Amino acid sequence: MKLNYIFYLFLSLLVLSCSDDDASNSNILTGRLANQLPAGQSSNDLLSANRFTSMVVEVVYVEGFEPTQAAINHFTSFLEDRTFKPDGITVEKRAIASPGLASYTINDIIAIEDANRTRFNTENQIAVWAFFADAESASNSGSGVVLGTAYRNTSFVIFEETISSFSDQPLEPSRNVLESVVIEHEFGHILGLTNLGAPLQSNHEDGAHPKHCNVEDCLMYWTAETGSGIIDMVSGGNIPTLDAQCIADLQANGGR
C-alpha cells in the first residue's frame, strides 16, 4: 500500500511538472520575455497567422530624427506583401528625448528599448520595436559605417543620424529611399533572412557575409546595411526588393 501511494504521488508530480512546462512554453509567446529572444526566432510568428493575426510596430525616434512618412508607408506595404496578418498591421510613432550619447553600443540600444518599449506580444497580436537613433553606431570603423542592426526577435535599430549624413545633398540619394532600404533590410533579418530562422530553400547565403543573400541586387545583400555600399545599391533611385530565393524562404516558413 505504501509503495502504491509513493508511485501515485510520483506520477502526480510528474504530470504537474509537465503541465507547468507546457504553460511556461505557451507563456513565452506573450509578454515582455517573448520579445527578448534572438533575432530570427520569431520568423514564423511574424510571417504567418498561425499564432498572431495582427502586428503592431512601435516606432520610437529621438526628437528631430523622425523617419519620413514615405519610408514608413513603403515599409508597411513591404510587411503587407510578405506576411499574413488578416486583422491588420499598425504603425505607432512617438518621440523621446535624446539620451545624449555620442554613439550607441547594442547594450545602449537594449537599455533604451527596455526603458521605453510599451508594446509586447498579446494573445493575437505580435509587437515589433524600431528605434531611430540620433548618433552613430559604436561599431563604425574606418572601413565602413553601420546603418541599422536587428538585435532581437522583434527589435531593430536604425542609425538615422548616419542615414541623414548620406542623403538629401546634391548627387546623393533621397533620405526616404535610404531609410526604406535599411528598415526593410533589418526587418528581413527579423523575418529570418538569410538562414536566420527561415530555413534555406536553396543555397544562396553569402559565405563571406553570413546571414545575407549572395545576389547583389537583392534587398538582403550585405551592402544594404553599410554606408558606401548602399549608395551603389540605390544609385538609380530605386529601392531594392527581395530576390526570388529569399521570397521562397519566407513562403516556406509561413509568409507570402
Image: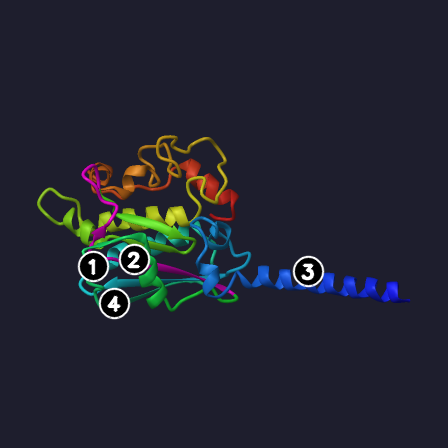
> Which of disc 4 and disc 1 is earlier in sequence?
4
SS for callout 3: helix
Q: Which residue is mark 2?
A: 108
Mark 1 and mark 3: Cα distance apart in space: 47 Å
The residue depicted at 19 percent of the width and 50 percent of the height is 162
- Label 4 crowd (10 A; few <14 / some 14-19 / many >=20): some
Residue type pointed to by label 1: Leu
The residue depicted at 79 percent of the width and 66 percent of the height is 9
Residue type pointed to by label 3: Cys
> Which of disc 4 and disc 2 is earlier in sequence?
4
Comparing labels 4 and 3, the label whose residue is closer to the camera: 3
SS for callout 1: loop
Mark 4 and mark 3: Cα distance apart in space: 44 Å
- Label 1 crowd (10 A; few <14 / some 14-19 / many >=20): few
Q: Are marks 2 and 1 in contact (CB under 8 Å)?
A: yes
> Which of disc 3 and disc 1 is earlier in sequence?
3
Q: Is residue 135 magenta?
A: yes
Residue type pointed to by label 2: Asp
Q: Are marks 1 and 4 in contact (CB under 8 Å)?
A: no
Q: Nearer the viewer, residue 83 or 114?
A: 114
- Label 3 crowd (10 A; few <14 / some 14-19 / many >=20): few
Q: Which residues are magenta?
A: 124-144
Q: Which residue is mark 1?
A: 101
Q: Which residue is mark 3?
A: 18
SS for callout 4: strand
Q: Which residue is mark 4?
A: 95
Mark 2 and mark 4: Cα distance apart in space: 17 Å
> Which of disc 3 and disc 4 is earlier in sequence?
3
Residue type pointed to by label 4: Ala
Mark 3 and mark 2: Cα distance apart in space: 38 Å
Q: Are marks 3 and 2 in contact (CB under 8 Å)?
A: no
As displayed, is residue 94 above or below residue 234?
below
